[in-house]
Image: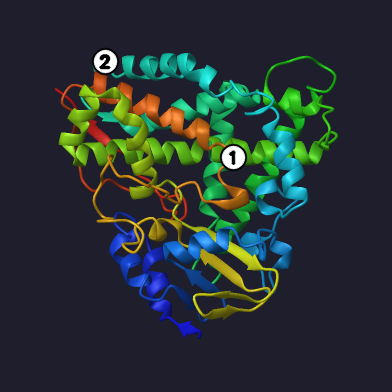
Amino acid sequence: MTTTQTPDMLRRILDYSARADPYPLYAELRETPVALQEDGSYVISTYRELAGILHDPHLSSDVRNLTHPMPAMQERGTPSFINLDPPEHDRLRRLAMRHFGPPHTPGLVTGMEPDLTTIVNGLIDDFAGKEQIDIVDDFAYPFPVTVICHLLGVPREDEPRFHVWVNAIVDSLDYDPKTDPKEKLDNGVQARQDLNQYLGGLLEQRHGRPGDDLLTRLANDDGPDGRMTDDEIVSTAHLLLIAGHETTVNLVTNGMLTLLRHPQILQRLRDEPDLVVPLVEELLRYEPPVHIIPWRAAYSDITVADTVIPKGSQIMLMLASGSRDPDRFHDPDRFDPDRQDNQHLGFGSGIHLCFGGPLARLETQTALNALVRRLDQPRLVSDPPPYRPSPILRGPIHLHIEQS
């Protein structure tokens, strides 16, 4: 059975006016677990259906399998592995993971904890003398950017250049030709080209030279799967540079905002630092950094919740809605760091489970523990704060606080 939902529902969710609190709209959306839109796309919003389709081998991440791809979805150049299907996805992900985590570099992330602590404490030291602090600009942005630049081997002094590119790329993710100026799409396309050219220039300097950064390792790796081409390395570095800091900025900022809205839990974290591990998992469910996977494609006809989704259809996955589904989570609109069986969708699921999840977790745990320990009676200046434009990567663009 196919249910057509009023197009107004999705439009309301994507509209900026819903950015501060989209969750009541998600609750309405879940009344129709699989909804056909006017343009022929499908929106999936309930936990059971999302979890199932994320593991369905008939679901494609390759834009070439869409019957009618929209301009913002079309890859320019070599696609990153997040936009590929097996076996190419698996090969490229394995090649990248050799240098990013187990089994070949099992201690990479955990071994970074002392450096992460040093970075966050240095940033908090710089709060001294400030009457007002912007958690985004003064902390949540520079922290993961410093980390990912170090990991990739990108000069930290070049950050202002790729900051502009990343903003334009993220801003273009939800481009709608019916309502947005074409400049929004064009800026995103140009930013992708500029970032790829920049990364390609860095890569040229790495061939045949020793080094510990990820670009150098990928440029000189001859593992069992062979070596990535230069284009594949650039696309992988492009993905990691954006995903490696954009989502963590949102996760840290959403975390601090949530704690300031729940002062008893903030105080509890101050008294019980180990609480931060389940707290971050609950944060990934309750206020995740990624709300929507804007498209997937159907390899063949797929049946989801008695709805047949035809081959080639665009499918939009509402991850944040699924993580607030009352059919899966008890009292889902309550922030509960003691929640059990917390199989959230904050990092997705299936073969595209977030590659950098372990690092993002450790960064957020380190950041939140340091902030609650060192800030003196922090208070929100305004609530809700102003939000970033994107409904896909959702988080405050600024989070101003005062402290005693």
Residue bearing mark 1: 355
Q: Secondary structure at mark 1?
A: loop
Residue 174 visible to the viewer? no
The residue that appears at 49% across and 62% down in the rendered structure is 50
Viewer-proximal residue, 77 or 53? Answer: 53
Q: CA distance from mark 2 to mark 1?
A: 36 Å
Specify the label residue 128 is tagged with: 2
The residue that appears at 56% across and 59% down in the rendered structure is 54
> Residue 141 at what x, y percent from top left?
43, 32
> Residue 148 at what x, y percent from top left?
56, 28
Which class describes the residues within 10 Å of circle 2: few (<14), some (14-19), or many (20+)? Answer: few
Q: Is residue 163 left or right of residue 74?
A: left
Q: Is residue 119 left or right of residue 309?
A: left
> Residue 90 at what x, y percent from top left?
73, 46
Type of residue at label 1? Phe
In the image, is residue 345 above or below residue 267?
below
**Residues at circles 2 and 1 in contact by the CB criterion of under 8 Å:** no
Specify the label residue 286 is tagged with: none
Type of residue at label 2? Ala
Snapshot quadrant of residue 256:
top left
Image quadrant holding the C terminus, namely: top left
Viewer-proximal residue, 341 or 381? Answer: 341
Snapshot quadrant of residue 196:
top right
Which class describes the residues within 10 Å of circle 1: few (<14), some (14-19), or many (20+)? Answer: some
Q: Which of the two marks, 2 or 1, is nearer to us in this view? A: 1
Q: Is residue 280 left or right of residue 57?
A: left
In the image, is residue 288 above or below residue 175?
above
> Residue 151 at what x, y percent from top left?
61, 24
